[in-house]
Amino acid sequence: MKQVCNPKLAMTPPMGWNSWDCFGLDVNEAEVKENARYMAAHLKEFGWEYIVVDLGWYAPGVTTTNYKKKNIPMITDEFGRLIPVEERFPSSAGGKGFKPLADYVHSLGLKFGIHIMRGMPWIAAENKQVIKGTDITCNQVAEENDQCLWYGSMYGIDCTKEGAQAYYDSLIELYTSWNVDFIKADDMGTWDGDGLNSPLRTDELEALAASIEKFGNKIVLSVSPGAAYIGNAYHLSRHAHMWRISCDFWDNWEALKRQFPRCAAWSKRKVAGHWPDADMLPLGKIGIRGEVGEARNTNFTYDEQITLMSLWCIFRSPLMFGGDLPQTDATTLSLITNKEALELNQHSKNNRQVYADEELIVWTADHENDSKHYIALFNIGETSLQQEKIASFLKDQLPMLDVWNHKLIQKEDEITIAPHGALLLVKDSTK
């Protein structure tokens, strides 16, 4: 199978911010710019670079309470392609699209991304808009009976029909003219880990990836939703840079526990440039206009946040922050700018789970140049883990640096791990 997407665009797991967890469907230009400025000032030096506008940028009046209704109003250009709502993104006026906003993000030394849905908007088919560069109309390739189960305003595309590839080509031509660096393509992936209830849409994923290749292969492609079927790993790695391994991940402990077996399974199927994605980090200030819960600081306790960051980093998941960055507190900022943890995420190998029971899960990894060795011990139980449970995994490796507390753990130290907590250690062989 041909390698379609360009792995060089994502040789390390992508790191960025996405608007969904905090602003839902109606983020506006001012909020995007505020988050971009914060990233440039506080996070860029640590590797954070993508600013991604999630679902709904083309739908006036859409919110988390009404977006699942069928055939909601959406704005398209003359060729049936979705364009930004000017009231929310004023710089898009006059047919400029997202280019002015992308240019602003680029001026800060960052990269710009958008969320898209599989297929085409219902209104493009309803109005029989012409597919750019053809005499074929959108209704001739649209499949009205193939709609997303949770966003009923898009029609699937019959990729066996003439004009189907041309429609996807026209999308990427437009997004390339906007200088888009990253696309999160939704309703492409499976809804469950077996891939039975909603199979991977290989036809439209292949069409989208081919269009990206045609226009220079300069866009990182992320596939949603999840959980991806592990049997599709090879196909996904040929056509995408990252893909979701779970359904939407929010800030509750049981959801975090469920990520452990998924990460363990997918750790065996990673290749550089293509990353299984454990989903966004619901940290900091979320739910401002989000779909789940009220406006809040994350429901995760500090110990659970340590566990979350440790697992995402040692698994090498993409890191997409979900909170409103300007409202980030000092504790959260310290977690997402921890140099040792981010180095583990970006520059490690041999990442694997080596032990798991009902209380303790252990992962290990090595730095890509073999200069460092990492151990992560996770307490998924409800009582503290004591020295006798942990000691055998450390053996003669101490002293090691406690990554989150910035202190050396010596052989004589008494080690405990709080319930729902983690201990992430690194040993530097060069020192």
Image: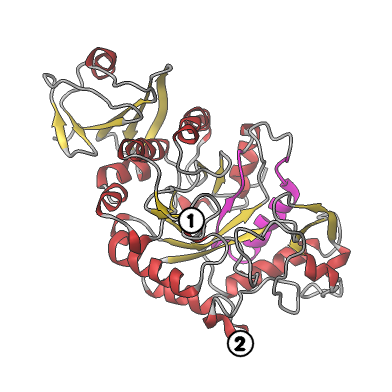
Question: Which of disc 2 and disc 1 is earlier in sequence?
Answer: 1
195 vs 347, nearest the viewer: 195
Amino acid type for the residue under numbered disc 1: Leu
Check residue 226 for magenta coloring.
yes
Is residue 109 at least partly visible in the picture?
A: no
Q: Which scheme is used to colour this image of the protein?
A: secondary structure
Residue occupied by mark 2: 94
Q: Is mark 1 on a helix, strand or loop?
A: helix
Q: Crowding at label 2, few (<14), some or many (≥20) Cα neighbours within 10 Å?
A: few
Task: Please report the residue visible at 65 percent of the width from the left and 67 percent of the height from the top.
Answer: 172
Image side of residue 356 versus residue 424, left or right: right
Estimate the spatial distance between the alpha carbons at disc 1 and disc 2, rounded to whole Å: 31 Å
Region rendered in magenta: 198-227
The location of residue 123, given as percent across then percent down, is 79, 70
Check residue 74 for magenta coloring.
no
Above or below, 184 relative to 90: above
Above or below, 152 relative to 127: above
The location of residue 397, given as percent across then percent down, is 21, 22
Quick one: which residue is furthest to the bottom in this view?
94
Amino acid type for the residue under numbered disc 2: Gly
Residue 9 numbered tag? 1
